Amino acid sequence: MRLLVFQHIECEHPGSLRRFLADDGIHWDAVNLDQGEPVPDLTGYDALWVMGGPMDVWDVDDHPWLIPEKAAIRTWVCDLKKPFLGLCLGHQLLADALGGTCGPLRPPEIGILDVELTAAGRNDPIFAGLPAQQKCLQWHSVQVARPPDGATVLAGSRDCRVQAMRFGARAWSMQYHVELEPDTITNWAAVPAYYDALMASAGPDGFETMKSASEASMADFTASAGKLYRNFMTQAGR
């Protein structure tokens, strides 16, 4: 398998999922769109992952590469119909690229918070073996306000209805993060936009509170990431 990964900021890479890729000997290519790297020929790849980032789906004036990225996502999901996984911004980009809408989330979700699977999510193969309710890292102030026509909502939270969705048979996305590593919170808090959002949402103790909560749940995060990875790869192989 050849995996293509769209990245939008250096610190938001596949995280803990990289260890599973390495264990399986899977080659993956990262395209750093924010650094001006172009979208490559898609036909040589078997799966596409789209990661998070500090920009919003509508920031096309400041980040014009969002336009060809959305076009590539449409081509991948609708024409090539190959396996897709989007996380955070990648979740929002999937919705936007396929005709859904995204908008501000007030208040933002920032912290280690609960996400609950819908009835459809509990029966979706991407979540096989995962608990119906789990704690996840949230760090977003934008939500999928309306999923694309034909999408199935797989998870939600108290403040954000569309936490996960599936489009067609092989495209999945999650608003929350499953790819945490021990240094994720520290690395992301070094990004000014992320740090400012954290302080505005959680106050001066927000960083330490989030870091402590993530450390307490790290074993669960890693186990959940492993199950999600294996489920995705099982479906990708079909």
Image (cartoon, rainbow, N blue to C red):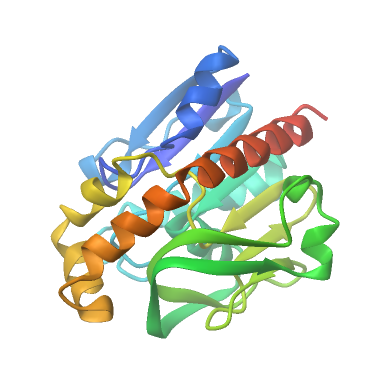
Q: Quadrant of residue 235?
A: top right
| Left or right: 1, with 182 as reference point | right
Observer-nearest of 182 and 229: 182
Q: Residue at x 42, y 44 (%)?
A: 180
Q: From the viewer's perspective, is residue 28 above or below residue 114?
A: above
Q: Residue at x 74, y 50 (%)?
A: 127
Q: Position of residue 51 (x, y in %)?
A: 43, 47
| Left or right: 16, with 42 as reference point | left
Q: Position of residue 211 (x, y in %)?
A: 30, 55
Does residue 1 appear in this view? yes
Observer-nearest of 190 and 81: 190
Quadrant for the N terminus in the image: top right
Q: From the viewer's perspective, is residue 217 above or below residue 3?
A: below
Observer-nearest of 206 and 193: 206
Q: Position of residue 106 (x, y in %)?
A: 40, 87
Quadrant for the C terminus in the image: top right
Q: Quadrant of residue 168?
A: bottom right
Q: Position of residue 94 (x, y in %)?
A: 56, 59
Q: Residue at x 65, y 41 (%)?
A: 228
Q: From the viewer's perspective, is residue 156 above or below residue 42?
A: below
